Image: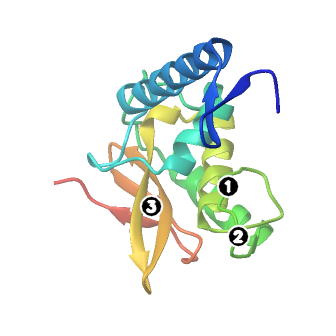
Amino acid sequence: MPENFRRRGEGGVVASSRWWTWMLGLPSIVLAAIVWIETELPSSAGSAVPMGYNLYCLRHIDECPSRGPHVVQLTPALRALIASVQYQVNAEIIPRREDVDVWQADVRYGDCDDFVMTKRRRLIKAGIPPTAMGISVFKVHGVNHVTLLVHTTGGIFELDNLRRDVLVRRRF
């Protein structure tokens, strides 16, 4: 038995004070991360942000700032950029359901969240502020599905790996 444990009574195990010190520190770190996620990361339309997205942002903090413009000016160049990223990423990634759902960008195979994060990363590299993008989560045939939203002055552009074209939702 490791030195961090000692036996008590009928097979019960009690941790030594060193182990409890470590355990008390761990929840504080986890709690701090959860509080940061809930207060700093933007969500779409007030909905809960999926845990996979939050974990991605913890690994790629530079791609997930909490401050910045929430809407970008719609120009013909921006419209063309969004369409180009939609077509390119949909053609490059081979759809595949994952056994363990890990949100990633720049993958060869992946599910809808991998399409979203790859499109998002490309738009960020092209100069679109991450704070002007969001995600939409809904069910398709009983399975959760995720799309990327780009908030512009001309409406919300939805990039979906299940569609060839970008869907434009008008603001009211």
The kind of residue tagged 1 is Val
The kind of residue tagged 3 is Glu
Disc 2, disc 1: CB below 8 Å? yes
Q: Position of residue 10 (x, y in %)?
A: 60, 42
Q: Count neighbours of disc 3 (C-alpha within 10 A) and say few if under 14, some if 14 to 19, many if 20 or more.
A: many
The kind of residue tagged 2 is Glu
Q: Position of residue 23 (x, y in %)?
A: 58, 23
Question: Which residue extends farthest left?
Answer: 172
Count of numbered circles in the view = 3
Horizontal relation, residue 107 to residue 102: left or right? right
Q: Earlier in the sequence, mark 2 or mark 3?
A: 2
Q: Position of residue 35 (x, y in %)?
A: 40, 26
| C-alpha distance separating marks 2 and 3 | 23 Å
Identify residue for label 1.
102
Tell me the mark number nearer the camera, choosing from 1 and 3.
Answer: 1
Q: Nearer the viewer, residue 100 or 81?
A: 100
Above or below, comparing residue 28 to residue 85 in the picture: above
| C-alpha distance separating marks 1 and 3 | 22 Å
Q: Where is residue 74, by image quadrant?
A: top left
Identify residue for label 2.
98
Say which mark, if any, is on residue 158.
Answer: 3
Q: Is residue 52 visible?
A: yes
Q: Residue at x 82, y 33 (%)?
A: 1
Disc 2, disc 3: CB below 8 Å? no
Above or below, comparing residue 26 to residue 119 in the picture: above
Q: Count neighbours of disc 2 (C-alpha within 10 A) and say few if under 14, some if 14 to 19, many if 20 or more.
A: few
